[in-house]
Amino acid sequence: MKGFRRVLVCLDFGPASRRVLEAGVDVAESGAAVRLLHVVAWVPSVVEGAMAGYGSARAIRTLHADSERQLGDWGRTVVGVDLSTAVVEGQPAGTILDVAEEWDADAIVVGQRRRGRFAALRPGSVVERVLRGARCPVLVVPV
C-alpha cells in the first residue's frame, strides 16, 4: 500500500519503534513528507500515595531535549522522503490527533504492543483513541 503524501509516524523509542518507522516510510509515496512525532507524556507523579501533579518543569525540559536529540538520530537514518521531526508535550492520543490535524496528515502510523488479538481496540488505549478520533487512515504496526 503506497500513495500517502503526508505521513505522521509516532515513535515511543521502544525496541520495536524501528518497525513503526520502516512501515511509515514504506507507505509514503516517493518524495512524500514524513513527520516523526514523539509525545513527552504528562504523567502524574505520586507523593506518599497522593497525586502531586506533573513532573517538574526542569524534568519536562530535560525529557523534551533528550527526546529531540533521539528523534533527530532516528531521522538521520531515513532517506528518500522529506523528513521533519516534532516533540510535543501532552497526553499521547490527543496530542497525536492534534498534530495530525494541524499538519494535515493523510496517514498516521502507530505501534501497538502485542497484548492479545484485539489489544489495539482495548477501551482507553492510546491506539484505540487514535483509531476512533483520526480523520485519516491509521496504520497500526504490531510490535
Image (spheres, rainbow, N blue to C red):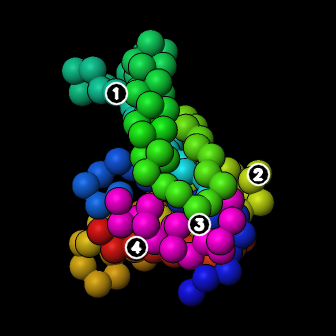
Which residue does the numbered mark 1 point to in the structure image?
45
Secondary structure beneath dot 2 equals helix
Q: Earlier in the sequence, mark 1 or mark 3?
A: 1
Q: Cα distance, mark 4 to mark 3?
A: 11 Å
Callout 2–callout 4 Cβ contact below 8 Å: no
Residue drawn at the location 56% of the way across and 76% of the way down: 27
Callout 2–callout 3 Cβ contact below 8 Å: no
Q: Earlier in the sequence, mark 1 or mark 4?
A: 1
In which quadrant is the C terminus drawn?
A: bottom left
Which residue does the numbered mark 4 point to in the structure image?
141
Q: Which range of residues does the magenta coloring cover? A: 18-33
Q: Amino acid at mark 4?
A: Val
The picture places residue 76, in percent across and down from the top left corner, at 47, 45
Q: Nearer the viewer, mark 1 or mark 3?
A: 3
Which residue does the numbered mark 2 point to in the structure image?
102
Q: Earlier in the sequence, mark 2 or mark 4?
A: 2
On screen, residue 35 versus residue 23, left or right, reads right
Q: Earlier in the sequence, mark 4 or mark 3?
A: 3
The picture places residue 112, in percent across and down from the top left corner, at 36, 67
Q: Nearer the viewer, residue 55 or 26?
A: 26
Q: Earlier in the sequence, mark 2 or mark 1?
A: 1
Q: Which mark is residue 108?
A: 3
